[in-house]
């Protein structure tokens, strides 16, 4: 199972637990989900880490992240805030859309980093 599939599975399980008032298993699923999200892109520019958006579901996974840019001489040169939306695809395993600022054409790099992280086997 790939990371994006595990995240979707856990989000569905959490939603089911909420509907059935199963706090014990909801907590277990939320803990497992938090552990996976902690391993999403962080450091190397993603200096504030990555957070799972509360509106995420098994059909649409949404991450919020910020990228810390450097200029040509290696000094920090500001931040860009981005949202990474992951959805299923009929042709491919998943699709990624990066919205927000595109400072220094960073969106392509962010998409590559998330694609790599989400494609790993769990």
Image (spheres, grey):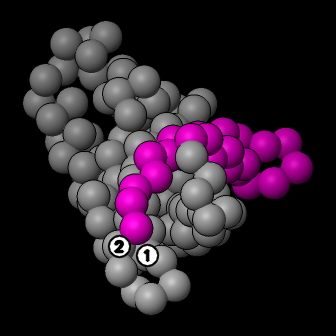
Magenta segment, which residues? 77-100
Residue, disc 1: 70
- Residue drawn where x is 36% and y is 21% of the image: 16
The percent coordinates of residue 44 (x first, y second) are: 38, 78
For label 2, the SS is strand
Above or below, comparing residue 5 to residue 115 in the picture: above
Label 1 crowd (10 A; few <14 / some 14-19 / many >=20): some
The image quadrant of residue 40 is bottom left
For label 1, the SS is strand
Residue, disc 2: 76
The percent coordinates of residue 92 (x first, y second) are: 81, 54
Position of 90 compared to 108: left or right? right
- Residue drawn where x is 38% and y is 34% of the image: 53
Q: Earlier in the sequence, mark 1 or mark 2?
A: 1
Q: Is residue 57 visible?
A: yes
Task: Tell me, yes or no, whether the highlighted magenta stretch contains residue 37.
Answer: no
Above or below, comparing residue 92 to residue 8 in the picture: below
Position of 111 compared to 84: left or right? right
Quarter in which the C terminus is drawn: bottom left
Mark 1 near mark 2, Cβ–Cβ under 8 Å?
Answer: yes
The percent coordinates of residue 1 (x first, y second) are: 54, 61
């Amino acid at each position: 199972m790939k990371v994006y599939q595990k995240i979707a599975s856990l989000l569905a399980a959490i939603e089911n637990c909420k509907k059935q008032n199963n706090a014990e298993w909801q907590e277990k699923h939320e803990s497992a989900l938090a552990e996976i999200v902690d391993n999403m892109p962080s450091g190397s520019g993603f200096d504030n880490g990555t957070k799972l958006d509360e509106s995420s579901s098994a059909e649409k996974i949404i991450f919020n992240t910020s990228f810390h840019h450097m200029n040509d001489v290696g000094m920090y040169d500001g931040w860009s805030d981005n949202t990474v939306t992951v959805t299923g695809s009929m042709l491919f395993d998943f699709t990624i859309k990066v919205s927000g600022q595109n400072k220094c054409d960073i969106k392509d790099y962010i998409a590559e980093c998330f694609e790599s992280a989400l494609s790993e086997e769990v």
